[in-house]
Image: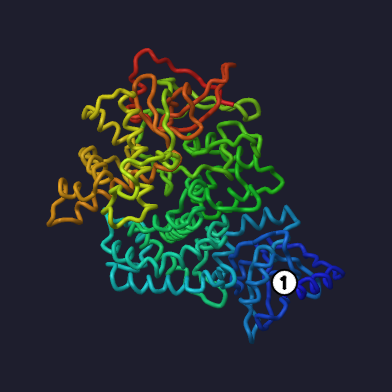
């Protein structure tokens, strides 16, 4: 096969490359017409210009480009177009045996060498996909590791049809109904995970799922089919099954068997895409900044597409006016800075400061500290809603409005606020907690969630690691004093700080949350004894629901977030870049506090947002003797 490929490639090096004809109409696109053929036949095609307003019939293709250095030639009207191997494979499979098929594929239908055309066509992407009859999603050829993947999804679909109430409710708002506590399907699905876990995890590792453009491609299309080799299933079945696994709290199982984390991220990607698709159906699109953060693990070849790829599905991109018009002549740093400037000046918003970002030692782009590299955001869930721009239940600056200005060619960000505290001691993040050389008790004997007998050794390691981290945070809450237990008021502060005072729904935890958290801590020590102490034998599900609610709240702010105390004796959660001696500030118009680092020249470096218990509801404005000041952040 390799020799055939090289022979064909060598033969086509002497053939003339295809020359694109200019698109003349305002809504003109090119459609790729495939003549009939067998899968094994070389790909031939022709391109025709059509106007979207004429309602042409065509289908769209969604695929991962693959390695751009490995290409093969296809014949287009007797000339050559070089395409990636993955696109060539998709065209071979999508070709009909007996009649022509009209398709739209970005790499062929857009002149990729014409930056002006690329910019214009990117602005039309939303219309291109919405006008297509359906979307054909190409995950790649079927290999042994995914040979049973689509069947496993169909089997789960059949199970949920029989066992989940309301499944698969096609109402657009179904994906906004999330159950309290643990799903009744949890234990059964866990007991048969050998039938579905590895097949689905293997499929989710296909690169398509974390490609940035796929969100717009799926969300704007009337319907979609997912292909792996010659097998296919409707997109909606894959999305419904994934949503039900999430509701059953079983996506964590994927994370446990997926060392690189990409399979878990891919399945969450399916949820995000479907949420956005249903938002569009409900005419309630998602704002641009939450979309940017939600897609932070997605990949693209051009860093400018981090923003450009989701403009068509964002509800508010026109609010930024000319700040984010697709322009491939602009550098990535210009695109990112223009977006943030638009957020500040056009929307009078400081929400971009809540994005979780750790600058690397070697910066890819020359950006001021208050502009994140949106192509390299942290995995940590930020202190912001990822579904919309409605506020969290925090009002650090009360009802004040942002007071900002930009100078130095928009490189210096000036904001008015107050210095209210200073960071003192900081723990490591939970996933960085090191196990002692000799675990006490030994890991093999460590009880944990559900019951010690139901957990494998890797689960016990994770539980012991979590216990050590929680104990370290608790010690810091006591300001390193040895008195244990913490006084009730301080213990309540500690419990709420461990979840940034947020439930998994983004609400404030209930008044009895300290008790709920103590029950969870007892379960980590010995689940059987905890059940005897706190549970009702006649209502075991209530006990499980309580534990699940606390666990889900912890998990949302466990990755990347560290625990700290401050010079004033407060406790809080900060991101990785924060260091001892950094100052805690409240900016007018900001819903959370922020961390700055003095540069020594009267200016500051922006470090990140934070949760500081006791400063989240306007308390900073009531502190006597703290004057307003304007911070110049570079």
Among the 4 quarters of the image, the one containing residue 360: top right
> Position of 320 compared to 621: left or right?
right
Location of residue 384 in the rendering, given as x and y in whole percent from the top left corner: 42, 41
| Residue labelled with disc 1 | 47
> Position of 478 compared to 342: left or right?
left
Way the structure is coloured: rainbow
Residue at 51% of width from left, 32% of height from top? 577
Does the image show residue 383? no
Mark 1 closeness class: few <14, some 14–19, many ≥20 residues within 10 Å: many
Location of residue 106 in the rendering, given as x and y in whole percent from the top left corner: 65, 63
Residue at 33% of width from left, 23% of height from top? 479
With respect to residue 208, does 420 lie above or below? above
Q: Quadrant of the C terminus?
A: top right
The answer to which of 258 and 226 lies nearer the viewer is 258
Residue at 47% of width from left, 62% of height from top? 201
Element assignment for label 1: strand
Location of residue 316 in the rendering, given as x and y in whole percent from the top left corner: 50, 47
Among the 4 quarters of the image, the one containing residue 323: top right
Location of residue 140 in the rendering, given as x and y in whole percent from the top left corner: 59, 69
The answer to which of 228 and 99 lies nearer the viewer is 228
> Position of 564 compared to 184: left or right?
right
Residue at 87% of width from left, 69% of height from top? 14
């Amino acid at each position: 096969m390799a020799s055939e490929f090289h022979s064909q490639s060598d033969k086509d090096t002497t053939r003339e490359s295809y020359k694109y004809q200019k698109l003349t109409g305002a809504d003109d696109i090119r459609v790729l017409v495939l003549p009939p053929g067998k899968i094994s036949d070389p790909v031939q095609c022709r391109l025709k210009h059509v106007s979207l307003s004429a309602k042409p019939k065509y289908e769209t293709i969604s695929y991962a480009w693959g390695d751009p250095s490995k290409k093969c030639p296809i014949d287009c009207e007797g000339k050559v177009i070089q395409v990636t191997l993955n696109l060539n494979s998709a065209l071979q499979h999508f070709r009909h045996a007996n009649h022509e098929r009209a398709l739209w594929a970005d790499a062929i239908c857009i002149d990729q060498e014409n930056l002006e055309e690329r910019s214009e066509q990117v602005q039309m992407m939303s219309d291109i996909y919405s006008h297509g009859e359906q979307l054909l999603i190409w995950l790649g050829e079927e290999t042994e590791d995914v040979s049973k993947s689509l069947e496993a999804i169909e089997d789960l679909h059949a199970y949920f049809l029989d066992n989940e109430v309301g499944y698969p409710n096609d109402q657009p708002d179904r994906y906004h109904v999330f159950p309290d506590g643990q799903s009744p399907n949890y234990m059964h699905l866990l007991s048969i995970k050998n039938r579905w876990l590895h097949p689905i995890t293997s499929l989710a590792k296909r690169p398509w799922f974390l490609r940035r453009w796929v969100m717009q491609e799926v969300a704007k299309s009337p319907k979609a089919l997912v292909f792996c080799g010659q097998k296919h299933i409707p997109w909606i079945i894959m999305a419904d099954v994934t949503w039900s696994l999430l509701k059953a709290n079983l996506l964590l199982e994927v994370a446990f068997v997926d060392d690189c984390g990409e399979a878990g991220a891919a399945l969450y990607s399916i949820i995000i895409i479907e949420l956005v698709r249903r938002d569009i159906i409900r005419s309630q699109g998602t704002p641009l900044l939450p979309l940017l953060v939600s897609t932070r693990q997605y990949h693209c070849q051009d860093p400018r597409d981090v923003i450009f790829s989701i403009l068509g599905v964002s509800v508010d991109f026109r609010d930024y006016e000319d700040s984010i018009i697709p322009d491939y002549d602009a550098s990535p740093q210009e695109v990112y800075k223009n977006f943030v400037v638009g957020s500040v000046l056009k929307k009078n918003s400081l929400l971009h400061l809540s994005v979780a970002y750790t600058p690397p030692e070697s910066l890819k782009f020359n950006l001021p500290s208050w502009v994140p590299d949106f192509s390299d955001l942290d995995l940590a869930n930020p202190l912001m809603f990822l579904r919309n721009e409605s506020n969290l239940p925090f009002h650090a600056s009360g009802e004040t409005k942002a007071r900002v200005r930009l100078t130095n060619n928009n490189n210096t960000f000036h904001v008015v606020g107050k210095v209210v505290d200073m960071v003192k001691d900081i723990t490591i993040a939970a996933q960085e907690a090191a196990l002692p050389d000799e675990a006490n008790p030994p890991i093999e004997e460590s009880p944990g969630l559900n019951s010690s007998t139901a957990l494998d050794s890797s689960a016990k390691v994770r539980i012991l690691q979590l216990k050590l981290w929680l104990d370290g945070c608790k010690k810091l809450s006591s300001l390193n004093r040895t008195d244990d237990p913490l006084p009730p008021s301080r213990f309540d502060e500690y419990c709420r700080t461990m979840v940034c005072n947020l439930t998994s729904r983004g609400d404030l935890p209930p008044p009895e949350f300290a008790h709920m958290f103590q029950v969870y801590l007892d379960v980590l020590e010995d689940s059987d004894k905890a059940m005897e102490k706190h549970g009702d034998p006649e209502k075991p599900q209530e006990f499980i629901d309580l534990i699940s609610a606390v666990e889900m709240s912890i998990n949302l702010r466990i990755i990347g977030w560290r625990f700290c105390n401050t010079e004033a004796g407060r406790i809080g959660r900060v991101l990785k870049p924060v260091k001892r001696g950094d100052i805690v500030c409240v900016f007018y118009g900001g819903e959370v506090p922020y961390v700055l680092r003095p540069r020594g020249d009267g200016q500051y470096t922006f470090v990140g947002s934070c949760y500081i218990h006791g400063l989240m509801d306007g308390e900073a404005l009531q502190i006597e003797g703290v004057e307003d000041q304007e911070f110049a952040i570079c």
